Image (cartoon, grey):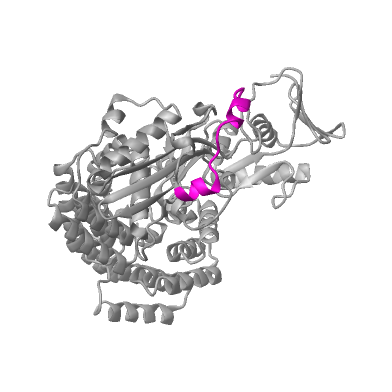
Amino acid sequence: MGGRYRFDDVEIDLNGFRLLKDGEVVPVEPKALKLLIFLVENRGRLVHRRELIDAVWSGAFVSDHVLNRAIGQLRKLLVDDAKAPRYVETVPTLGYRFVADVEPEGPSPAIPATITPGKVSDPLAAEQSALPRLSNRERESNESPLGKPVVSAIDSHQIQGIAVLPLEDFSGISGNEYFADGMTEALITSLAKIKSLRVISRTSVMRYKKIRKPLPQIARELNVDAVIEGSVLRSGDRVRIAAQLIHAATDRHMWAESYERDFRDILSLQSEIARRIADAIKVMLTPEERAQLAENRKVDPEAHELYFKARYHWNKRTEESIKKAIGYFNRALDCDPAFAKGYAGLADAYHILGYYNMLPPKEAYPNGRAAALKALELDDSLAEPHATLGAIKRDFEWDWQGADEEFLRAIHINPGLAEAHHWRGTLMSIQGFHSEALREKTKALEIDPLSVVIRTDVGRMLYFARNFDDAIERFLAAIDMDPHHPIAHSWLGTVYLQKGRFDEAISELQKGRSLSDDSSYALAQLGHGYAVAGLENDARAVLAQLTALSKRRYVSPYDIAVVHVGLRENNKAFEWMELAYEHRSPWLGCLKVAPQADPLRSDLRFHDLLRRVGLLGRSAG
């Protein structure tokens, strides 16, 4: 390595491995300087946090806190302001970008070609600028200019990440947005089957629904190279879709086309659009991927429309909406008993009801398992039921190996299924395999970067790994993204308890209870917090609330056990743990790593419970 980099009054001497300002050597930690060099060498490009950690700390298990501290040191040395950066731009939750102009001197490492807003780095820029661009009228009418697809001359090999923005509903019918949302999700699912392409999941892109932002800004926030935007128009049994692929950094069109088909051909239409996009960015499809994108089966229009309505309600993730979704899934299956996706949707719904104590586990999970198995019997190429079956094996059957096999199968079929990585990460975490858990959660966030649920669960994973300071940072970041997310507040309060920060803990736990509309889980965590903080009367008042609540709806015995653990009433705690075992409570799977269970660990009854759940003797090695 040799040469120098200059920007403003700053100079990096690569030979001497030193930093100078106005010709004077500035003391700097070696890792911070290495971090700066890596950012400069990748200037103009968003560098993901995980990539920075791997590059600077050579693959060691380094927390985000260490990276934040190094970035903070650089800002101090460079007199840089995070809110108005001159040198290092922060892309919240994703990473950093060096934004200043740099003058390299002498031999230096090769700098990867980059595309920045307003500049085209490839030699075909002139040709690209001459290509037709959609006018506002053409955008509104969804007509391709000159009546034919637009094909861009931008170097498509730079397209590695892509986002499908929510398709606009042009039907003009009130309450019809479920259809456009369903088509958006279907296109995402089709594209996500391409292993060499990172496709942002539905959860993150739906945050841009009816929100107008510059495409380059959206691309930076999602860390993608291109976006797809378009519209859908439903009229009777005819569907019209217009879509355009836009190179985000330059805001130039790479491809645009519109289609009109019979609704029965909707699956083949989705697959065709995915293939056209893959061709436009010159992605090499494997034979398996081509087979997956060769869907030509006709659908029952009524069943598919009911399915879209079901998914629309399922994605709201409230107890009321999930139960409404089940009704739509069942109606879809009445129309078409061989509709595999309908059974896959039912499996997803029952899994959510069981995991969040909306139904007793012995009622929810067997229904979910039966639906997932039926979906796979009808169509084993679907990734979603494999992932859901993995979650059921993890949370209800405590079949750890079987769960992992199902998650891996789902990932093989659809590597872009964020839930499969997310749920496998949880499986690794509760067994104590924390490094593997972090890898899977990181992958899930690459696919679904704006998911508050996944971000919160990364904090929970760090809590289970007893990395409390980093867990707090993750929970605070999730709350910053969504201040009304109850689970993030409850988990933050739980970690504050471990740190002895009782006032802050109670405040967060109370927010979690309030935002969750007094869910039994949030109530139990608050009761546990009261007990640990020495507020015994308040803890017992929560026990009374849980008892009263159990007369109206399902309350997990595990929730009541947690309060008794806080009160150090171990005998009562074990009585309720035994009942939780009979109920097959999902939370028993966390006992091996949960700090909350520490007061029980020295008791032989605890080891016997671990043995029966299948966790005794399993270690991270």
Q: Quadrant of residue 309?
A: bottom left
Give whichever of 146, 2 is nearer the camera: 146
Q: Nearer the viewer, residue 258 or 203?
A: 258
The residue at the point 42 percent across, 56 percent down is: 453
Q: In this image, 602 relative to 374: left or right?
A: right
User: Residue at the spot x=26%, y=66% of the render?
Assistant: 324
For image coordinates 64% across by 21% down, the residue present is: 110
Left of 10 or right of it: where is 157? left
In the rendered structure, does residue 472 fall within the stretch colored magenta?
A: no
Front one among 542 and 532: 542
As drawn, 60 above or below 178: above
Look at the image and tell me in which quarter the N terminus lies.
top right
Q: Could one spot residue 118 in this view of the protein?
A: yes
Q: Is residue 425 visible?
A: no
Q: Residue furthest top?
A: 107
Residue 405: image x %, image y %?
25, 38
Segment colored magenta = 122-141
The spot of residue 17 in percent (x, y) is 74, 26
43, above or below 16, in the image? below
Placement of the C terminus among the 4 image quadrants = top left
Q: Foreground: 95 or 267? A: 267
125 magenta-colored: yes
Give residue 137's position: percent from left, percent from top. 52, 49
Q: How many numbered circles are shown?
A: 0
Residue sticking out furthest to the front: 146
Horizontal side of residue 615 vs 508, given as left or right: left
Q: Please provide percent x and percent y for residue 587.
A: 31, 59
